[in-house]
Amino acid sequence: MSSATAKRKRPEPKSLTPPLTGQEKVIYELIRSRREEGIWSKDIKQETDIAEAVVNKCLKVLIVKKLVKEVPNYQNKGKKIYMAVEYQPSEALTGGFWYENGKPDEESIEPISKLCTGVLHNMGVGTVEDIANAVRNTRALNFDCPTMRILQLVKALVLKGQLLEMRSTGYGEFSSIPVGAVCYKCVTKTALPKAGAFASIPCGVCPHLSICTPDGLVSPSNCVYYGKWLDF
Amino acid sequence: MSTQRGIRLAVHLIDSHFGHLVSKVCECLLLKGSLTLNQIVSNTGLPRPDVKKCLLVLIQHNCIQPFTLEQRGGFEEGNNVSIHYTPLFDNILHRLRFSKFVLLVMNKLGKECADLLQGLLEHGRLTMELIIRRAAESTKTEAPDAVHDAFKRLVGARFVERCPDSEPFIELPTDEEATTKNRRSKFAKVVPQTIEQRAIAAAIPMEAKRFLISCDTGSEDTTETDKDAPSILSAGEKRKRDFSEIDDELGAAGFQKEVLWRPNFEEFVRCLRHKACIVHERLRLDEGAAIVLSAMLESSRNPEGGAVSRYSVPMSLNAIYEEVMRTEVGRTMTLDHVRTSLDQLGCTKNADDLYSVDLSNLIQLCRNEEVESFMLKKYGGVAYMIFRLLSKESRFFETDKISQDILKEKVETQKILFQMWQDNYLSMEKISTPAPKTNHFLLWRINQDLVWKQVLDGMYHAALNLINRVSFELNKEQELRELPSSRITGVLVSRKARLLKIRYCLESSLMRLDDAIMLFHDF
């Protein structure tokens, strides 16, 4: 989770720049003007009208002089994006709060998701604000985690089938929640995704179902998956 | 929705129940739609008398519906009238679930009624006299009154109905009707009915007559029928008698003088649909919600009479509460608890404070769960999340948005998306931003109807495979099965136990799979 804290730092803008050649300066200014969005190497070439080899050479120099950095692009790993060192990559580049170096930060996501499920289990039903407050009150996080970010985790948990999204009716277990507010509840063991009828037989997931016929090379009587399934 | 694999399953069922000849005729009808006797003979290449007998068997078992169709004749010729036979795909598949229907009646009305139904299912259609005589003979009792009462209960509960009209007459639409229909369909987008649908609808007796038990022994005066029937039908009958056609023999067989009864599959489907909703809500929510839903569905009958209605019959809170109080578990529930359960079920309240539940929404949830579980097993957890995300909102999602929402790496997400797309579970659109900075985006969405159709098709295939595997296993151990139990010792005991286990596993899987087929096809 410490990594999650580190990436929120915003260093002070640099004021002193080492001496640069004319082309290096043009490229540096262009990169800097793009702030946290960064710029693709091909776009630098196109916008400055400098030859590709020269652009690449200048970029190397700027990186060595610690004026520019290469940042991972979440959307396309092969696309090299350059950014002035004083800026942090935008969410469009990193993928967002829960991403580290263009990949989902599993080290943060997993424990905080468990924490969310745990606090929700204790409270029964709660809105995302309730969950975020309860998570903060545990003091298990050593960085500030906004409610919006917790919502992202909660929504992923709903898609995973671990939480249930519902609207408050205003009474019963929802008495403390305003009517109509979106709230969440832990899924009970009985409601966990159960194997459907089609998924629980070999044909349901058989890759050869399309070529399976009663008298064909692949048939229910010589099927290896059936053999394994009925091996009593 | 009869797909190729569905037809194969239906043909197999007919083949195993009635033999190869009947299944050949049935297959011809299922593949080509409604045909005349001549057309069936030329398509199957079977002798005419054999085809006639096959058609009689299929009519007797409610697998086809004959109808008389009026068609425009050629130049300076009058209109032609011919008898067509249309296959009833749903009724053929119902043969797979007869045991469920019997169990349902057993639980609701008792063993006597279940026995009566069993006989009716075996014979397809019978007169009341025959049903009662058959039941009295099989139970060796001299109390036909009890059997008669059981039959009345069956009809009262709508599990048994009068057979539809043997040959409803479908006449040509008049010029006026045709122009009105065209005008209406242009503006109101009315889905036109096919001739087969019109024939099936026309064959069903009027609601008052459909479940009417006459006091006599079951025979009915045909002149009375003619008097009751609408003028169009009378005209049809008249024309039908006029043409001395090839179908005379079949027509005479179908032209009933006695009241015939048959199982009302529509009612069974409705009951099983309700049961599926209740079981699902018990698992999804709690026992309370299941009791409230059960009370809402059990206490009211759909006034339209259709098997699949979107909403339950509206009921007041007090009426629902009264119904809940009648059940043992419901007695502990407070009015507040009932109200909460109604909200959990997503019940809507109309202007008169009457509650009704959207059953089609509950069925959709069940269908989604079945497909989600299939996705989980076939493609894994990421695909499960993707499917849930896309099916929640039926719109296009960009790859990045999907991977951000499910918090998974883009490469992994994209790989799964492509797999699902290749298997036709997703539709994809590629869009590009205009030059000079051309960017390509892939957009994904689920075409729910297509996915359901594909899953259903797979289920038909899987059901046929299960049936074939059962017969393979039974044939393999044919000798063992024929041995008297006294000679089954040593290794044979474990072999027999193994065969039992295999049979149980396959047949219970088939029943579960059939539930899922009903979920997608009948509900």
Image (cartoon, coloured by chain):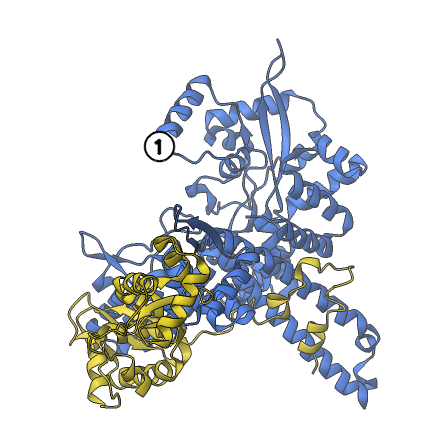
Q: Is residue B477 above or below residue B183?
A: below
Residue B404 position in % (x across, y down): 37, 68
Figure check: B427 above or below B512: above
Residue at 45% across / 42% down in the picture? B209
Name the chain letter of the residue that bears numbered label 1: B
Please say if A52 is above or below A225.
above
Tell me: A66 left or right of B67: left
Mark count: 1
| Within-10-Å neighbours for mark 1: few <14, some 14–19, many 20+ | few
Chain colored blue:
B
- Residue B48 location (% of width, % of height): 78, 35
Asked which quadrant contains residue B335, the reply is bottom left
User: Can residue A70 be seen by looking at this rendering?
Assistant: no
- Closer to us: B387 or A53: A53
Residue highlighted by disc 1:
B188
The structure residue drawn at horizontal position 43% and vertical position 36%, both measured from the top left corner, is B191
Query: In terms of depth relative to the viewer, which is nearer, A148 or B436?
Result: B436
Name the residue nearer the viewer: B332 or B94. Answer: B94
Expressed as whole percent of the image width and height from the top left, the position of residue B223 reads: 53, 29
